[in-house]
Image (cartoon, rainbow, N blue to C red):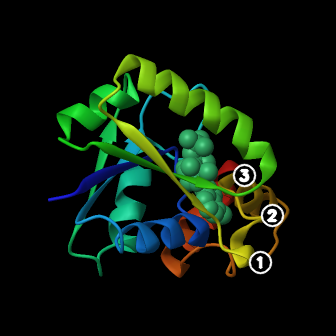
């Protein structure tokens, strides 16, 4: 049984994340999506909301579990009995941070390896921050996120106005 964790903030989940999830499932038998709880960024959505949107977005996949975590990623991987961490790479700008993080993690725990999936070109520009910026300005985010996520994002900004 090859199990991996896919960590992130997912604030909110986008089609870019879902593409990485779908492609990971061709490589691993089970994927545990780890939603980071105590992030230094000030998230738009609570961790419970982010988990719930991910569950709804991945309900068609039987070998996906969504959980929240805090603390060290390598500890979450070990607890989950996963030897692999999956991360997505969009652009060269992601590379330095991702390299440092994977090297740090392998010093902390050499038995956990990081695997990178490069983004599909059609999602290379896409990030949760882009989604929030466009929505805040009243733009159309239907090409970026599933419909149920789109409703949650618009609801948040309406409530904030
Ligand atoms: P973090 O704050 O940890 O970077 P994110 O939710 O922004 O968390 O991203 C989680 C993971 O998904 C990261 O590895 C990120 O590079 C990847 N990712 C985000 N957007 C895309 C995308 N459009 N295509 C491929 N990978 C992506």
Whether ligand 1 has any atom under 8 Å from the Cβ at mark 3 is answered as yes
Between marks 3 and 1 in the image, the one whose residue lies nearer the viewer = 3
Q: Is residue 6 above or below residue 39?
A: below
At 53% from the left and 61% from the top, the residue drawn is 13
Mark 3 lies on residue: 129
Counting residues from the start of the chain, the first of labels 1 and 2 encountered is 2
From the image, tell me which residue sits under label 1: 140
- Compute the Cα span from label 3 to label 1: 14 Å
**Secondary structure state at the residue bearing disc 1:** loop
Residue 120 horizontal/vertical position (percent): 66, 74
Instruction: Name the spot of residue 55 as percent of width and height, x first.
Output: 32, 65
Mark 1, Cα crowd under 10 Å, few <14 / some 14-19 / many 20+, is: few
Q: What residue is pinned by disc 2?
A: 134
Classify mark 2: residues with Cα within 10 Å, few (<14), some (14-19) or many (20+). Answer: few
From this viewpoint, which residue is outermost toward the front? 110
Quarter containing the N terminus = bottom left
> CB atoms at circles 1 and 2 under 8 Å apart?
yes
Q: Residue furthest left?
A: 1
Marks 3 and 2: CB-CB under 8 Å? Answer: no
Q: Residue at x 24, y 44 (%)?
A: 82
Q: Is residue 115 left or right of residue 83?
A: right
Q: Position of residue 45 (x, y in %)?
A: 52, 47
Judging from the image, what secondary structure is the residue with disc 2 in?
helix
Q: Helix or strand or loop: what does disc 3 sit on?
A: helix
Q: Is residue 14 left or right of residue 82?
A: right
Tell me the tag on residue 76: none
Q: Which numbered disc flags the more N-terminal residue, 3 or 1? A: 3
Query: Is residue 107 placed above or below 128 in the rendered structure?
Result: above
Bin the neighbour count of mark 3 within 10 Å (Cα to Cα): few under 14, some 14-19, many 20 and up: few
> Label 1 to label 2, Cα distance in Å?
7 Å
Where, by quadrant of the figure, is residue 2 drawn?
Answer: bottom left
Q: Nearer the viewer, residue 99 or 51?
A: 99
């Amino acid at each position: 049984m090859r199990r991996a964790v896919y960590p992130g903030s997912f604030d909110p989940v986008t089609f870019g994340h879902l593409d990485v999830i779908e492609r990971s499932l061709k490589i691993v038998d089970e994927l545990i999506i780890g939603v980071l709880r105590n992030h230094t960024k000030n998230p738009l959505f609570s961790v419970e909301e982010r988990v719930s949107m991910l569950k709804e977005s991945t309900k068609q996949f039987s070998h996906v579990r969504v959980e929240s975590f805090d603390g060290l990623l390598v500890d979450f991987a070990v607890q989950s009995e996963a030897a692999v961490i999956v991360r997505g790479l969009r652009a060269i700008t992601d590379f330095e941070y991702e390299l440092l993080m994977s090297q740090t993690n392998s010093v902390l725990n050499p038995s956990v390896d990081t695997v990178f999936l490069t983004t599909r070109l059609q999602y290379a520009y896409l990030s949760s921050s882009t989604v929030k910026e466009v929505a805040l300005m009243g733009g159309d985010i239907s090409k970026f996120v599933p419909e149920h996520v789109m409703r949650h994002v618009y609801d948040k900004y309406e409530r904030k106005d």
